[in-house]
Amino acid sequence: MNLLTLPNSQALTTSIRATAQVFEDPKSVALLTRIKMIAPSDANVLIIGETGTGKELIARYVHELSQRKGKPFVAVNCGAFSESLVESELFGHEKGAFTGAFSAKAGWFEAANGGTLFLDEIGDLPPSIQVKLLRVLQEREVVRLGARKATPIDVRLVAATNVRLEEAVLAGHFREDLFYRLRVAHLELPTLRNRPGDILPLAEYFVTEYRRRLGYGEITLDEHAKAKLLSHAWPGNIRELENIIHHALLICKNNIVRSEDLQLSSISLHRPREAETSGRDAHQSQLQEVLHAYFETGAPDLFEQLEDTIVRTAYQHCHNNQVQTAKLLGISRNIVRAKLIKMGAINALK
């Protein structure tokens, strides 16, 4: 079994991080292949996935497969610091830079020099820090708070988020230039419910792990328990599965985990209902495939051609009605009209 585990996982019993990751399901196998392609380079990596899907584990694995193996790996949660402290934590400060700065302190970028810096929940960074982070990535140097001289750094950045940064960019909450700087390479971690082939291997691993910690003999999952695990939606992903197995081992009898021992959560996390989004996701996937194929052609003026095609197709869909076309696309009629005139679909005099 392809297994990743988090270092010192026994000390993380109250953590919401996933402490183990397997690659048995076809989606996970495909992810593993992509990781092995991306990791040896020095490119920045953006990892996208829900809480509990194992983003830090993947970041550590990227580091282990890179030329920076053996150098520092520093993990930082961007949401763990107040806006007033995050700059000092990331970039460091000099003595006297602010009240309470009694001595100079290196930031996390300097601590990770030569290795990899993992910034979890990067979408939580305030705009002022996003600007400074972009400069650090561009110039490959940091300026400590209160310093006048820059310090050169050699750091590979791996960032992670549980939100769609594209949406944050469109909403004006995240800088577009920083988004593209981070997304040189990206990895999307499927949720546990979308990789059912990993559920039982992970469950068996956690049974073995907690059996060993508790000093128990052999423990088995009966068939009804396995079926119950496979049917659950896993809103908390791997971490939820670990906690459920831990609890089940505490209350099971005769060294057998039965269906009734699995106290599954009934919490429904705030996410679009899959019944409503599955069709949309399928269409989006098809569109992405078409776009990727189109991008491979290397045709000039790609954006303008795609924009013209969208407007022309929408205009035909709306039976050549400009007002309805504008409503369909969510833009003004004047923009639709100007586009149609430019592409020769209508006469400017009409």
Image: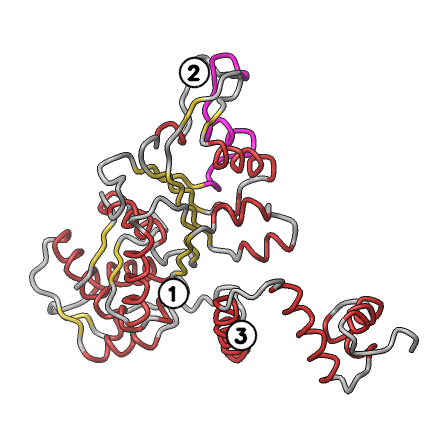
Residue type at mark 2 is Ala
Location of residue 348 (image quadrant): bottom right
Q: Is residue 47 above or below residue 151?
A: below
Please tell me whether mark 2 sits on a helix, a strand or a loop.
loop
Q: How many marks?
A: 3
Q: Is residue 236 magenta?
A: no
Task: Count residues near mark 2 (Cα–Cα under 10 Å), then give few for <14, some for 14-19, many for 20+.
Answer: some
Please tell me the numbered disc located at residue 287.
3
Q: Is residue 327 above or below residue 250?
A: below
Q: Residue at x 51, y 74 (%)?
A: 290
Camera-nearest label, 2 or 3: 3
Marks 3 and 1, how far apart in space? 20 Å
Please tell me the numbered disc located at residue 75.
none
State left or right for residue 46 relative to residue 335: left
Please tell me whether mark 1 sits on a helix, a strand or a loop.
loop
State left or right for residue 327 relative to residue 233: right
Location of residue 224 (image quadrant): bottom left
Task: Give the quadrant of the N terminus.
Answer: bottom left
Q: Residue at x 59, y 48 (%)?
A: 176
State left or right for residue 213 relative to residue 64: left
Magenta segment, which residues? 78-99
The residue that mark 2 highlights is: 104
Marks 1 and 2, how far apart in space? 42 Å
Mark sitting earlier along the chain (1/2): 2
Task: Count residues near mark 1 (Cα–Cα under 10 Å), then give few for <14, some for 14-19, many for 20+.
Answer: some
The residue that mark 1 highlights is: 190
